Amino acid sequence: MHDDTLEQHRAMRSAVVAEYDDIVAHLDALKADGKVKTATYKQLFARKMTLSAMLDIYRKHGLL
């Protein structure tokens, strides 16, 4: 694997982790405001599940 490709993979992993953390924080704020039935909450929750699956794959392969 070329060095630039490895760096791209690392950057992608970091971006997934950062987005996941941001979404969790946003969901927590919406939940605190009692907005768990909003479309925004549902969309963010679905995105969180997608990112969670990606992170599980990284963990499975020892990359996280």
Image (cartoon, helix red, strand yellow):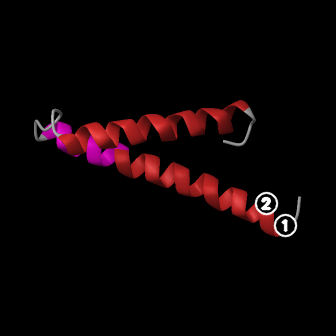
Residue extending farthest right: 1
Q: Residue at x 48, y 38 (%)?
A: 50
What element does badge 2 sit on? helix
How would you rate the neighbour count of disc 1 (Cα within 10 Å): few for under 14, some for 14-19, many for 20 or more? few
Instruction: Judge from the rendering whether residue 52 lies leftward or rightward of residue 63; answer left or right.
Output: left
Front position in the image: 33 or 8: 8
Q: Are marks 2 and 1 in contact (CB under 8 Å)?
A: yes
Furthest toward the bottom, the residue is 4
Answer above or below: position of 4 versus 12.
below
Report x, y in % for residue 2.
88, 64
Question: What amino acid is labelled 1 in the image?
Answer: Asp
Q: Which residue corresponds to mark 1?
A: 3
Amino acid carrying label 2: it is Leu
The magenta span reads 24-32
What distance separates the C-alpha of mark 2 from that of mark 1?
5 Å
Residue at image position (67%, 39%) is: 58
Q: Quadrant of the C terminus?
A: top right
**Frontmost residue, 59 versus 54:** 54
Residue extending furthest toward the left? 34
56 in magenta: no
Identified at 30% across, 42% down, the residue is: 43
In this picture, residue 15 sits left or right of residue 31: right
Tell me the residue at 13%/38% (across/down): 35
SS assignment for the magenta stretch, majority: helix
| Residue indicated by mark 2 | 6
Of residues 58 and 43, the one drawn nearer to the viewer in this rendering: 43
Q: x and y percent of residue 23 in the render? A: 36, 47
**Dot 2, how many residues are within 10 Å of its Cα: few (below 14), some (14-19), or many (20+)?**
few
Q: Report x, y in % for residue 20.
A: 45, 46
Q: Quadrant of the N terminus?
A: bottom right
